Amino acid sequence: MELWNGFVAVISQLLGGLAHGVGNSYGLAIIILALLVRLGLLPWTLRAAEQGWHQRRRMEALKPKLEQLAKRHADDPAAHATAMRALYREHGVGTGMGGGLLTALVQAPLGLGVYSAIRQGLGGAGAFLWIPRLARPDVWLAVLVAALSYAAIALNPAMSTQAKTLLQVLPVLVSFVVVWHAAAGLGLYWAASSGVNVLQATLLRHRLRRFAR
């Protein structure tokens, strides 16, 4: 607990220093901090997303062989599992923790720390852009975050069409509801992070064009 409180305190000091350096604008400081965090992780998250795309392509190519294995070992689940693992190894398909999950595990404590620091510092935060008070929710900020979340999913080439159909609605609704009921300062951090997600999806589309031809 002491370690966590110390971590949050360091982020709070950084946030306060950023606000002081940009004319005591807490809103701008939150955006800068979010961009620093997400852009710093972008090479890693972009690499993980590209690996996920290649993994999905390999899995799609293996569907006929997987169906054959299922028929061949219909009465022997253990033999079926062994044959599947051998097939995956042969074609370089990973079966353990993916790069995307590892990236999420790294981002989670960092994101929670930033959120905690922002929540603690909102007492002295005032207006920013159209938002009258960063300590209160803002519906238009919620709309912006939802739109950015939708754009990031729609542009992401690493997701299958079926996955996009299922995932486009739920994250957009969740992001809208959460930001609508959270302090606008947290919404600003979410919006900046979502903007980097859109950038990542755009860069990923560009990088994967050579493989999709």
Image (cartoon, rainbow, N blue to C red):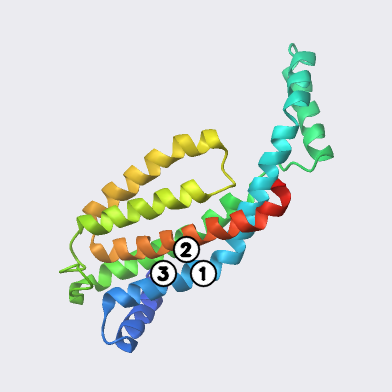
User: Residue at the spot x=32%, y=43% of the render?
Assistant: 173
The amino acid type of the residue labelled 2 equals Val
Q: Position of residue 145 (x, y in %)?
A: 34, 56
Q: Position of residue 128 (x, y in %)?
A: 22, 73
The residue under the point 39% across, 69% down is: 2
The answer to whether any part of residue 152 appears in the image is yes
- List the single residue furthest toward the front: 213
Q: What residue is shown at x 31% (from left), y 82% (from top)?
A: 19
Up-down relation of residue 100 to residue 62 (above or below): below
Q: Quadrant for residue 20, please give it.
A: bottom left
- Looking at the image, do the residues carrying marks 3 and 2 touch, with CB atoms under 8 Å apart? yes
What is the secondary structure assignment of the residue under circle 3? helix
**Which residue sits at x=19%, y=77%?**
124
Alpha carbons under labels 1 and 3: distance apart: 8 Å
Residue 105 image offset from top left, x and y in percent: 53, 55
User: Does residue 123 sit above or below 207 in this rendering?
Assistant: below
Q: Residues within 10 Å of mark 1 (few under 14, many from 20)?
A: some
- Residue position for label 3: 34
* N-terminal label among 2 and 1: 1
Tell me the SS state at disc 1.
helix
Dot label at residue 39: 1
* Amino acid type of the residue that numbered disc 1 sits on in the rendered structure: Leu
Q: Position of residue 179 (x, y in %)?
A: 28, 54
Q: According to the image, label 2 marks what residue? A: 196
Q: Comparing marks 3 and 2, which lies closer to the viewer?
A: 2
| On screen, residue 98 above or below 8 | above
Give the position of the N terminus as an image quadrant.
bottom left
Q: Work out how far the residue at label 3 is from the one at label 2, CA to CA, in angstroms.
A: 9 Å
Say if residue 95 shows up in the picture: no
* Upstream in sequence: badge 3 or badge 2: 3
Amino acid found under the numbered disc labelled 3 = Ala
